[in-house]
Image: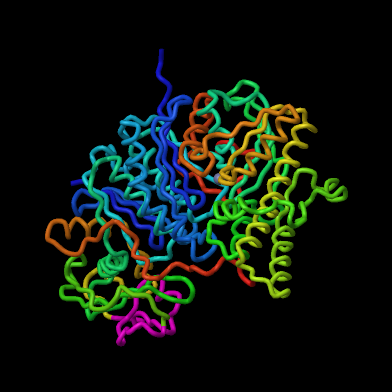
């Protein structure tokens, strides 16, 4: 089944997969232009793979947690594509996608478990703690043992595990990553912290959804995981009276 | 005869999620979801709450519009969407939806101007744009006076000029603030109007912003409502200090009526003066404040006296909705404007001179 995968929780990504097999992907690390970049990226991956949109069987979308505005672009796009094409839309946690992305890049070095941390803005991170059962299987060989949740970087219960993701990059003191020269087991394994991914890869996100559709696993309704309540202060113009 | 294209319009610039289907100048389906109730306790639109509500309302509204028209998405030939001006996060939801729809249906996308759409909605009633008109757009989010020229009656040669706008609060915002001062609920418009029914509009001489001779020289067509709000606030305070009950219905009614009269007077005065100065014979009213019967009534009275034709679309087309977006999209398609790129950016401050992005 052809799956179109979207994630706008941090970067802007679109990928086209046949089951777990990646056909085409596009990812932009531009946190301020989700609204402009996503639709052209969808168009581009369809064109690159020579796939007509009517051949799509499902849409997979990262539902966060993430800062609000960009996340909604992905979810709105997925919802409407699903509606107009008459295909199902499956949500998946963006931190799960980040965990699978990280494990795919650093199998042995993360085999002892790790924390994924995304930038939640306002000096906080969205985090989840991951226990690894089988590092050779980035899609199924791990479990979430904490989160998803939002917290100040110093309040994340990392329990000494290395942290991966944009949130870890931003708050290196509070969320240390892999030690330099961490053992890499397999050829091509990237123990170097700088080489580990900072954002969920849309291709991995799509493969994760394909795997969970096939074997079961957590799929979510296509609605944003906000975690935070809206900033509902009385607007400045009305305050002070 | 070739059928005119079916245009689906999406509006999400403020707190209304609107979807509508228009063919030519015929409105076929129309659905609006409003998040107004969720903003009541904050006394105004909270952008993040509005954006969340847009996303939740998106598919239900889309489906209702199609059902009402007895059409499916597959029938849609063009997707038009408000690209600005408006709240950034709110605009993004509608534009993302419109792009996805254009992609999925493989049809052109048109990003259009929200304010011009308020003007264009009149074609659903009258069949064509007037050759020349002024438009007075008054809502909780905007207060503008526009000069609209369209010699051909469609969007081919549509020229829109911003004559004037509010320098501070929007007219609808003034209603909201005064309602709060009087202990009336949000949104203020309907509650102030109801309270005003039994009041004396001459009980208090509230100021008419930017109507003094020296202001008129610099701001002939601009509006200002913050001074009016301050005057109301002072009156309420004085009443309280004098030992009066500020919730006394008679007091509230008189303040509401006098305030409403001041707003209606300023709007009518400025709009009629602009029509006269420019020799324009048609005035178009749009925006949620058009729901206020005193604003409509005084405008009708003064326009008639001045020999100006006042055009007021049905109220459901005056407040923000998808029909106005589809109407402008339809005009734009007929005139060969667009399409907009899939990379279209929203523009919260889109100038009124840009009809199609
Ligand atoms: Zn409006």
Quick check: can you spot residue B84? yes
- The quarter of the picture where the C terminus of chain B appears is top right
Q: Residue furthest top?
A: B1
Task: Residue at the far left: name it.
Answer: A215
> Which quadrant of the render holds ligand 1?
top right
Q: Is residue A159 magenta?
A: yes
At x 44% / y 79%, what residue is drawn? A171
Q: Percent x, y for residue B67?
A: 31, 36
Residue A166 vertical placement versus A1 (above, below): below
Between A93 and B279, the one nearer to me in the picture: B279
Residue A7 relative to residue B12: left or right: left
Identify the image quadrant of residue B114: top right
**Magenta span of residues:** A154-182
Q: Position of residue A200 (x, y in %)?
A: 33, 63
Residue A162 vertical placement versus B13 (above, below): below
Give me the residue at 75% from left, 30% from top: B306
Q: Nearer the viewer, residue B162 or A116?
A: B162
Seen in the picture, residue A157 relative to A53 is either above or below; the reply is below
Residue B30: horizontal and vertical position, in percent? Answer: 41, 37
Depth check, front residue: B18 or A181? B18
């Amino acid at each position: 089944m052809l799956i179109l995968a979207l994630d706008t929780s941090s970067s802007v990504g679109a990928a086209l997969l046949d089951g777990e097999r990646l056909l085409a992907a596009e990812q932009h690390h531009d946190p301020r232009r989700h609204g402009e970049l996503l639709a052209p990226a969808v168009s581009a991956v369809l064109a690159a793979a020579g796939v007509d949109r009517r051949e799509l069987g499902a849409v997979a979308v990262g539902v966060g947690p993430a800062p609000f505005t960009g996340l909604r672009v992905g979810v709105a796009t997925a919802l409407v594509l699903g509606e107009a094409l008459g295909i199902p839309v499956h949500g998946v946690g963006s931190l799960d996608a980040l965990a699978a992305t990280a494990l795919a890049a650093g199998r042995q070095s993360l085999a002892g478990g790790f924390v994924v941390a995304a930038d939640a803005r306002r000096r906080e991170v969205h985090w989840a703690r991951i226990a690894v059962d089988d590092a050779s299987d980035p899609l199924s060989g791990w479990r979430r043992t904490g989160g998803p949740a939002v917290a100040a970087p110093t309040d994340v219960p990392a329990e000494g595990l290395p942290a991966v993701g944009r949130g870890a990059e931003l708050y290196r003191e509070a969320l240390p990553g892999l030690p330099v020269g961490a053992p890499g087991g397999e050829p091509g394994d990237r123990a170097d912290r700088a080489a580990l991914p900072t954002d969920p890869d849309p291709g991995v996100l799509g493969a994760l959804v394909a795997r969970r559709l096939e074997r079961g696993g957590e799929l979510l309704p296509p609605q944003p995981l906000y975690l935070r309540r809206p900033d509902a202060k009385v607007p400045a113009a009305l305050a002070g009276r | 005869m070739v059928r005119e294209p079916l245009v689906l319009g999406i509006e999400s610039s403020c707190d209304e999620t609107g979807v509508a289907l228009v063919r030519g100048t015929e409105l076929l389906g129309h659905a609006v979801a409003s998040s107004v109730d969720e903003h009541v306790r904050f006394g105004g639109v909270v952008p993040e709450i509005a954006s969340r509500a847009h996303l939740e309302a998106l598919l239900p509204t889309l489906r209702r519009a199609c059902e009402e028209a007895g059409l499916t998405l597959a029938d849609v030939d063009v997707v038009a969407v408000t690209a600005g001006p408006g709240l950034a996060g709110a605009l993004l939801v509608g534009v993302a939806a419109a792009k996805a729809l254009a992609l999925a249906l493989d049809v052109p996308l048109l990003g259009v101007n929200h304010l011009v759409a308020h003007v264009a909605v009149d074609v659903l009633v009258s069949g064509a744009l007037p050759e020349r008109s002024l438009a007075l757009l008054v809502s909780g989010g905007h207060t503008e006076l526009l000069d609209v020229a369209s010699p051909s009656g469609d969007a081919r040669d549509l020229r829109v000029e911003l004559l004037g706008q509010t320098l501070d609060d929007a007219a609808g915002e003034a209603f909201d603030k005064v309602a709060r001062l009087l202990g009336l609920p949000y949104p203020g418009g309907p509650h102030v109007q109801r309270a005003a029914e039994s009041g004396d509009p001459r009980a208090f001489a509230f100021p008419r912003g930017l109507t003094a001779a020296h202001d008129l020289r610099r701001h002939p067509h601009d509006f200002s409502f913050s001074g009016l709000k301050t005057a109301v606030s002072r009156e309420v305070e004085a009443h309280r200090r004098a030992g009066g009950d500020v919730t006394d219905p008679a007091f509230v009614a008189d303040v509401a009526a006098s305030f409403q009269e001041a707003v209606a007077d300023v709007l009518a005065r400025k709009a009629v003066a602009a029509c006269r100065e420019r020799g324009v014979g048609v005035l178009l009213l749009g925006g949620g404040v058009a729901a206020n019967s005193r604003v409509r009534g005084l405008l009708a009275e003064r326009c008639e006296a001045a020999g100006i034709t006042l055009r007021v679309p049905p109220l459901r087309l005056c407040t923000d909705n998808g029909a106005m977006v589809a109407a402008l999209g339809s005009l734009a398609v007929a005139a060969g404007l667009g399409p907009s790129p899939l990379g279209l950016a929203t523009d919260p401050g889109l100038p009124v001179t840009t009809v199609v992005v």
